Image (cartoon, grey):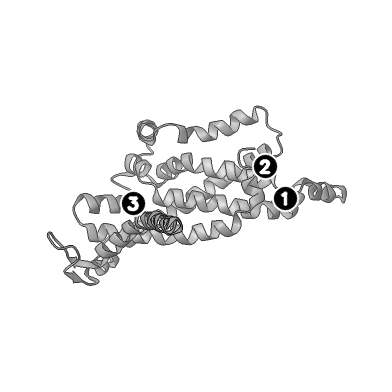
């Protein structure tokens, strides 16, 4: 009897967890294919691809928003890598003074409410003429992206076998050549993982884009917000599914590139 109760309780716990995880996704799928669904019906009355055609129609704006989101995300990754590669290497080699303080500074944007941070950034960008520009949106995405980029890149460089670098230098390889052919290839999985995190963070970012980019810049998260606020749950659900696909695909890639030795170095 006790064994039976344990099995029932375990199944109940897993059932609740599965519902909490997959229930919202199932609801998204219902709304994405529902053409008619209203109270008191528990399920859609009519299914179809009417709203999918609306989303992917040239005048629907979704593809343009997707292109804008992808362009901003890629630019954010590039800017973050330009900062995090040299900074992460220096932090990993512990050659920077006040190392802990430097890493803490990159963590500060996550320590404060995003709304307060973005409101003040929007005010500063307005004075600089960066509001409503791709450059302004990329910079505001970079503020949060650097948290992942610097910390993970530092961990990736910390996991590099320093003896291989010393061997290359002893054989006459110059510093830059050693970095490009010995150090960077070893740290590359961690660098790729950090780039993926930054890309996904930028792709899904709403608040910063809302305060800095609206009304001139329109991304998929902004389209999702405007559709849901307008009561067009079908378009909002389809947009959410479009955002979900790269998130799942890239997280599977992160699972492949993120090794235990890199994870053990994060924050050290």
Q: Is residue 76 left or right of residue 33?
A: right
Residue labelled with disc 3: 221
Label 1: few (<14), some or many (≥20) within 10 Å?
A: many
Q: Earlier in the sequence, mark 2 or mark 3?
A: 2
Looking at the picture, tell me which residue is in the foreground, 202 or 172.
202
Tell me if label 1 and label 3 are in contact, CB under 8 Å.
no
Q: Label 2: which residue? A: 89
Residue 134 % position (x, y): 40, 47
Q: Which mark is residue 159?
A: none
Q: How far apart are the two marked residues, 1 and 2, measured between alpha carbons? A: 9 Å
| Horizontal side, residue 79 vs residue 267: left or right | left
The disc at residue 183 is 1
User: Is residue 67 something one can see in this rendering?
Assistant: no
Image quarter (top left, top right, bottom left or bottom right) of the C terminus:
top right
Determine whether label 1 and label 2 are within 8 Å by CB. Answer: yes
- Comparing 6 with 247, the one in front is 6
Location of residue 20 in the rendering, given as x and y in whole percent from the top left corner? 35, 54
Q: Secondary structure at mark 3?
A: helix
Left or right: 99 in relation to 236: right
Examine the image and state in which quarter residue 70 appears.
bottom left
């Amino acid at each position: 009897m006790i064994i039976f109760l344990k099995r029932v309780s375990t199944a109940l716990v897993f059932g609740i967890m599965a519902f909490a995880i997959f229930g919202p996704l199932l609801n998204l799928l219902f709304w994405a294919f529902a053409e008619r669904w209203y109270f008191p019906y528990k399920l859609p009355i009519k299914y179809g691809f009417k709203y999918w055609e609306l989303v992917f129609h040239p005048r629907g704006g979704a593809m343009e928003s997707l292109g804008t989101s992808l362009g901003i995300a890629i630019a954010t990754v590039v800017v973050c890598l330009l900062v995090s590669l040299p900074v992460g290497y220096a932090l990993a080699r512990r050659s920077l003074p006040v190392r802990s303080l430097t890493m803490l500074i990159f963590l500060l944007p996550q320590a404060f409410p995003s709304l307060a941070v973005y409101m003040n950034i929007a005010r500063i960008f307005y004075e600089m003429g960066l509001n409503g520009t791709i450059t302004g949106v990329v910079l505001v995405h970079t503020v949060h992206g650097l948290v992942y980029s610097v910390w993970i890149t530092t961990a990736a460089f910390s996991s590099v076998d320093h003896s291989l670098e010393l061997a290359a230098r002893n054989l006459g390889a110059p510093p830059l050549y050693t970095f490009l052919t010995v150090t960077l290839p070893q740290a590359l999985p961690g660098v790729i993982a950090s780039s993926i995190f930054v890309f996904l963070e930028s792709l899904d970012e709403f608040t910063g884009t809302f305060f800095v980019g609206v009304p001139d810049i329109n991304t998929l998260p902004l389209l999702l917000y405007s559709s849901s606020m307008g009561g067009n749950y079908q378009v909002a659900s389809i947009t959410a599914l479009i955002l979900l696909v790269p998130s799942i695909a890239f997280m599977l890639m992160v699972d492949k590139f993120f090794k235990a030795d890199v994870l053990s170095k994060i924050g050290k």
